[in-house]
Amino acid sequence: MLCLLFLYLLSLTSAMDEPKCGKNEKYFGCGACDSTCEQEEVCTMECRTPGSCGCIVGYRRDTHKACVPAESCTKKLKCGENEEIYEHGACDGTCSHPHLACVLMRNPKPECGCKKGFVRDDHKKCIKIEDC
């Protein structure tokens, strides 16, 4: 009985630590990685700022920092240096894995990816493969 009480109190403490997120947001224990209407964010599996709210799948941050449906974004993506728009999703190699075996993606949303001959470095910038 004492063990059950302890587990119950532990679950309440965990739930209290998790902040309430806004509309079209959810809590990410390892930190959020939100794209905006203007810029596609390149997200990795590594933790960022732990414990933050981010947009749910299919949503992006608008200029007012609200999570809106991606299709409601009217501005064209602005890609970074050595990037270009891929109409059905990008599949960027990295310095440690320059030649990824990418499957045919059926991503209906365009996103920025490295130009041919470029890969992502540790700072998520597209650089020439030979500069790794």
Image (tube, rainbow, N blue to C red):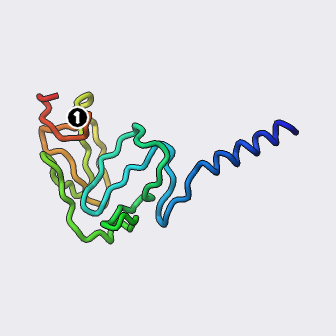
Image coordinates of residue 5 in percent, x first then y, are 81, 42
Quarter the C terminus occupies? top left
Answer few, some or many: residues within 10 Å of disc 1's Cα (few below 14, many 20 plus, some between 14 and 19).
Answer: some
Image coordinates of residue 6 in percent, x first then y, are 78, 39
Residue at 64% across, 45% down: 14
List the single residue furthest toward the right: 1
Image coordinates of residue 122 in percent, x first then y, are 26, 33
105 horizontally vs 3: left or right? left
Q: Secondary structure at mark 1?
A: loop
Residue at 31% across, 59% down: 36
Image coordinates of residue 16 in percent, x first then y, are 64, 51
Label 1 is placed on what type of residue?
Asp
In this orientation, which residue lies closer to the viewer: 85 or 65? 65
In this orientation, which residue lies closer to the viewer: 47 or 112? 47
**Which residue in the structure is indicated by mark 1?**
121
Please identify the quarter of the rendering in which residue 109 is found.
bottom left
91 horizontally vs 8: left or right? left
Residue at 36% across, 54% down: 34
Q: Is residue 114 above or below residue 106?
A: above
Residue at 51% across, 53% down: 27
Task: Give the total number of marks visible in the rendering.
Answer: 1
94 horizontally vs 28: left or right? left
Please identify the quarter of the rendering in which residue 38 is found.
bottom left
Quarter the N terminus occupies? top right
